[in-house]
Each structure stands twice: as C-alpha cells, then as structure tokens.
Image: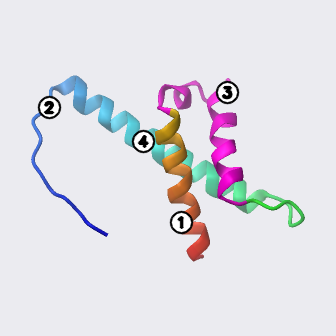
Amino acid sequence: MLVYEFKAKASKAQLIAIDKAIRIGQFIRNKCWRYWLDAPREEKVDRYTLNKYTKVLAEDPEYPFVAALNSMARQAAAERAWAGISRF
C-alpha cells in the first residue's frame, strides 16, 4: 500500500466538510459491520450486499446526513468494512 503525505492549505469551511465526510464514512463502516454481525446465518452477506446497504442507509429518514455523502464514497466505506470482515 502506498501512502502519500502532504500538507494542504484549506479554509475552515473545507476542513469542516472533510471532517464531516470522514465521520460519515466511519458511521457507514460501523453500520456495515453491525449489519454483517446481525444477519441471520442463512442470509449471505457479501461485499455487494454491503454496497446495496449503503443505498438503504442513504434513503433512511433516521440518517439524513448519510445522503449528503457521495455514493462512491459511501461504497468505498462499505468496501473498507468488507476488507476488515474478510480478514476476520
């Protein structure tokens, strides 16, 4: 894995937006983990199921902030959750 480190100059509003996006990504990852843990044994939960679950989360009126995140970013959070699950 390559890691790039750099110093970025951003306005306060941009930093708040980045922080919000990171927190929503963490929320989605945690919800995907919980969805996988709570699924019945006969239901197969794979990475595609988790990608579909991000759309369900975005449409849920209980979590309106999830829809603010781009769909590709939501799916990337689900992919990172699946990467952890598959190594588990």
CA separation in Å, label 1 and label 3: 24 Å
* Amino acid type, residue under disc 1 in the picture: Ala
Mark 4 belongs to which amino acid? Arg
List x then y, in percent, for residue 9.
Answer: 9, 35
The residue beneath circle 3 is 59
Q: Are marks 2 and 3 in contact (CB under 8 Å)?
A: no
Q: Which numbered disc flags the more N-terminal residue, 3 or 4?
A: 4
Image coordinates of residue 82 in percent, x first then y, are 58, 61
Picture residue at 15% right of the left edge, 57% below the top = 5
Q: CA distance from mark 2 to mark 3?
A: 31 Å
Asked if the residue at tag 2 contacts the one at tag 4, i.e. Cβ–Cβ closer than 8 Å, the answer is no
Question: Would you say the residues marked 3 and 4 are in contact, meaning their CB atoms lie under 8 Å apart?
Answer: no
The answer to which image quadrant residue 43 occupies is bottom right
Residue occupying image coordinates x 60% and y 76%: 88
The secondary structure that most of the magenta stretch takes on is helix
SS state under label 2: loop
Q: Residue at x 75, y 59 (%)?
A: 45
- Between disc 4 and disc 2, the foreground one is 2
Disc 2 from disc 1: Cα separation: 31 Å
Task: Return the disc, 4 or 1, that comes first in the chain's sequence.
Answer: 4
Is residue 59 rendered to the left or right of residue 42? left
- Which residue position is annotated with label 4? 23
Q: Write the start and end of the magenta stretch as one range.
A: 46-70
Q: In the image, what residue type sits under mark 2?
A: Ala
Q: Earlier in the sequence, mark 2 or mark 3?
A: 2
From the image, tell me which residue sits under label 1: 83
- In the rendered structure, the answer to whether residue 41 lies left or right of residue 73 reads right
> SS for tag 3?
helix
Q: Nearer the viewer, mark 3 or mark 4?
A: 3
For residue 23, above or below residue 34: above
CA neighbours of label 1 inside 10 A, class few (<14), some (14 to 19), many (20+): few
